[in-house]
Image (cartoon, grey):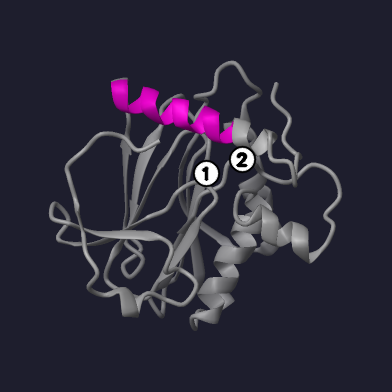
C-alpha cells in the first residue's frame, strides 16, 4: 500500500523519546518536511508529544487525528472497518483485533492520549478518508464515516474538521503539536497501488482464522 515517493533514510536517533508502546511504528527523517515522521499503517495508531509528523495513506479506511489542544499531545489511528461482527468475547478478542476496527481504534487512541497526560475535555478531532475506492464491494468508506460520526456524537467529542467521502484515496499528514493537517488526493498509479493494497488487507482480515468477522460483498 506504500505509494512511490522520495527515498527516506531510516534513523535511530530519537528512539528513546518515543512513547512506550509505540516502538514498533516505523519512524524516519523526512528531508522535505524537515522533521521525523511516523508512518501509521492499517490497524495501527500512534501518539506523540514531540514536534514530529504522523502520516498515512487512506482509501476506504478512515483516520482520526485527535489532539489535546492545550497540552499539544496528539495521535492518529487508521482503521478499515467500523465495528466487529458478532459478539465481543472479552480481553483476548480486543487484543486480537488491535486497532483494525473503528470502535477499538478510537478507544485505544483516546486512552493513549489520556495516559500521556491529555484531558478528555480538551480533545479535538479531525477525520479523514472513507473514499469509495473498493467499487466491487459494499461502500465500506461510507460505513466508516457513519460510524465515526456516531461515535463522536455519543462520546460528545468535538469534530473540528473533516475531509471524507468522494472517490479518491488520500495522503494525510498530521502535526500533533500544532494540530495542523495536510491532505493530498492521490490519482493514477499511486491511487491504484493503494487500492490494491487495501483490497488485499481486507481479504486478509476476512481470512483471519481467529476473528473471521469480515464479510466481503
Mark 1, residues whose alpha carbon is within 10 Å: few (<14), some, or many (≥20)? many
Q: Where is residue 31 shown, x and y percent of the image?
A: 13, 55
Q: Name the mark on residue 33.
A: none
Kindly give the residue lying farthest to the bottom in the view shown. 117
- Say whether residue 194 is magenta: yes
**Residue shown at the point (52%, 25%) measured from the top left:** 132
Locate the N terminus by quadrant: top left
Corner quadrant of residue 4: top left
Asked which secondary structure carries label 1, the reply is strand
Q: Position of residue 143 (x, y in %)?
A: 65, 35
> What residue is at 56 percent from the left and 47 percent from the top?
79
**As drawn, is 180 to the left or to the right of 23?**
left
**Which of these two is toward me, 44 or 52?**
44
**Which label was assigned to residue 144?**
2
Residue at horizontal 40%, vertical 80%?
Answer: 71
| Residue to which mark 1 is pinned | 62
Place of residue 216 in the rendered image (x, y in percent of width and height, measured from the top left):
69, 25
Q: Is residue 93 above or below residue 6?
A: below
Q: How far apart are marks 2 and 1 (CA)?
A: 6 Å
Farthest residue in the top direction?
136
Are the residues at dot 2 and dot 1 in contact (C-beta closer than 8 Å)?
A: yes
Name above or below for residue 127 compared with residue 1: below
Which residue range is magenta in the image? 189-202
The secondary element bearing badge 2 is classed as helix
User: Considering depth in this image, is 184 or 1 the residue closer to the camera?
Assistant: 1
State left or right for residue 213 relative to residue 9: right
> Is residue 138 shown left or right of residue 181?
right
Q: What residue sits 31% from the left and 67% below the top?
A: 178
Amino acid at each position: 500500500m506504500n505509494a512511490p515517493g522520495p527515498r527516506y533514510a531510516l534513523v535511530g536517533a530519537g528512539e528513546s523519546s518515543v512513547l512506550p508502546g509505540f516502538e514498533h511504528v516505523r519512524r524516519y527523517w523526512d528531508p522535505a518536511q524537515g522533521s521525523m515522521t511516523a508512518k501509521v499503517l492499517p490497524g495501527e495508531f500512534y501518539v506523540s508529544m514531540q514536534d514530529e509528523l504522523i502520516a498515512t495513506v487512506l482509501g476506504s479506511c478512515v483516520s482520526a487525528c485527535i489532539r489535546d489542544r492545550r497540552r499539544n499531545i496528539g495521535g492518529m489511528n487508521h482503521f478499515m472497518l467500523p465495528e466487529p461482527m458478532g459478539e465481543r468475547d472479552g480481553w483476548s478478542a480486543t487484543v486480537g483485533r488491535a486497532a483494525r476496527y473503528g470502535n477499538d481504534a478510537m478507544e485505544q487512541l483516546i486512552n493513549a492520549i489520556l495516559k500521556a497526560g491529555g484531558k478528555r475535555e480538551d480533545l479535538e478531532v479531525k477525520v479523514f478518508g472513507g473514499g469509495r475506492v473498493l467499487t466491487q464491494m459494499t461502500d465500506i468508506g461510507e460505513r466508516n464515516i457513519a460510524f465515526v460520526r456516531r461515535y463522536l456524537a455519543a462520546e460528545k467529542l468535538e469534530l473540528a474538521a473533516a475531509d471524507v467521502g468522494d472517490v479518491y484515496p488520500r495522503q494525510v499528514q498530521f502535526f500533533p503539536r500544532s494540530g495542523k493537517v495536510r491532505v493530498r488526493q492521490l490519482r493514477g498509479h499511486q491511487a491504484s497501488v493503494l487500492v490494491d493494497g487495501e483490497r488485499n488487507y481486507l481479504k486478509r482480515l476476512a481470512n483471519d482464522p481467529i476473528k473471521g468477522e469480515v464479510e466481503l460483498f
